[in-house]
Image (cartoon, rainbow, N blue to C red):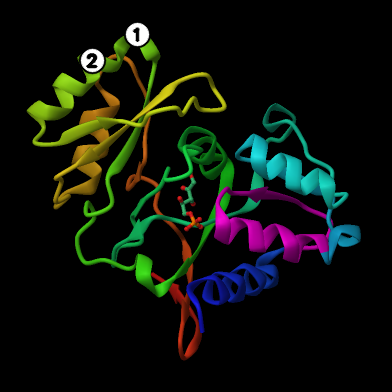
Amino acid sequence: MTQDELKKAVGWAALEFVTPGTIVGVGTGSTASHFIDALGSIKDQIEGAVSSSEASTEKLKSLGIPVFDCNEVDSLDIYVDGADEINGNMQMIKGGGAALTREKIISAIAKKFICIVDSSKKVDVLGKFPLPVEVIPMARSYVARELVKLGGLPEYRLNVVTDNGNVILDVHNLAIIDPVELENKINRIAGVVTVGLFANRGADVVLMGTLDGVKTITQ
Ligand code: 5RP
């Protein structure tokens, strides 16, 4: 099986968590894109979706799935999204697709975060994947200097402006032993909009695509 086939398998497996008649939180990326395809197959059974990016919104609409403004929704049963890395405590690095801020907002609203990944995303220690940080443009250099003080090597993601009009710093060289502490520290830097560490609020369920099938992991 290819990596994309593993992503497809978990994208479709996530349908079992969708309750008919509800609004579904939808993530961003190639794995989430498979979930959107799956959602399209039951579009008449759901009320609609809240989307974490312009790209996902466009795809949802193209499949005829109504997309709600996040402000219209008090709570969501589930948020389904991929990850760039996930550890044994279901904490994640996200934001490879630059959608981390809206992803964090929707996951905060959702009762359950269903993380859909292929097994290559599983790590013992987070940080090999450069940690994305969304930053207000005028704070870019200041935030970069602060991230260096935390032991990271920030790299400005060229030619990328987020859906919120901000820039991304990808932080290399981190072995994230205490993800909650690092998430809190980076959140405290002025000019940081969002750090792509999902540690305070990790996943509740992980669907992992492996060569032996889709494994469901809960804590
Ligand atoms: C986007 C994300 C994605 O979930 C993450 O990058 C994984 O992407 P993919 O499913 O394409 O491997 O956080 O901001």
- Residue kind at label 2, given as amino acid type: Ser
Rounded to the nearest angstrom, the CA distance separating label 1 from label 2 is 8 Å
Quadrant of the rendered image containing residue 57? top right
Say which residue label 2 marks. Answer: 141
Residue drawn at point x = 29 percent, y = 63 percent:
87
Q: Position of residue 199 (x, y in %)?
A: 32, 48
Packing grade of label 1 (10 A; few <14, some 14-19, many >=20) is few
Picture layout, residue 130 above or below residue 68: below
Quadrant of the rendered image containing residue 58? top right
Quadrant for the C terminus in the image:
bottom left
Q: Which mark is residue 88?
A: none
Region of the chain picked out in magenta, as a range: 19-40
Q: Is residue 212 left or right of residue 75?
A: left
The residue at the far front in this view is 159
Say which residue label 1 marks. Answer: 138
- Mark 2 secondary-structure assignment: helix
Is there CB contact under 8 Å for labels 1 and 2? no
Residue drawn at point x = 14 percent, y = 45 percent:
173
In reply to whether residue 211 is colored magenta, the answer given is no
Near-viewer residue (106 or 95):
95
Q: Is residue 154 left or right of residue 105?
A: left
Q: Position of residue 5 (x, y in %)?
A: 57, 76
Q: Position of residue 146 (x, y in %)?
A: 15, 22
The residue at the far bottom in this view is 212
In reply to whether residue 23 is colored magenta, the answer given is yes
Q: Is residue 17 left or right of residue 139?
A: right
Residue drawn at point x = 71 percent, y = 63 percent:
18
Residue drawn at point x = 78 percent, y = 40 percent:
67
Packing grade of label 2 (10 A; few <14, some 14-19, many >=20) is some
- Residue kind at label 1, given as amino acid type: Met
- Mark 1 secondary-structure assignment: helix
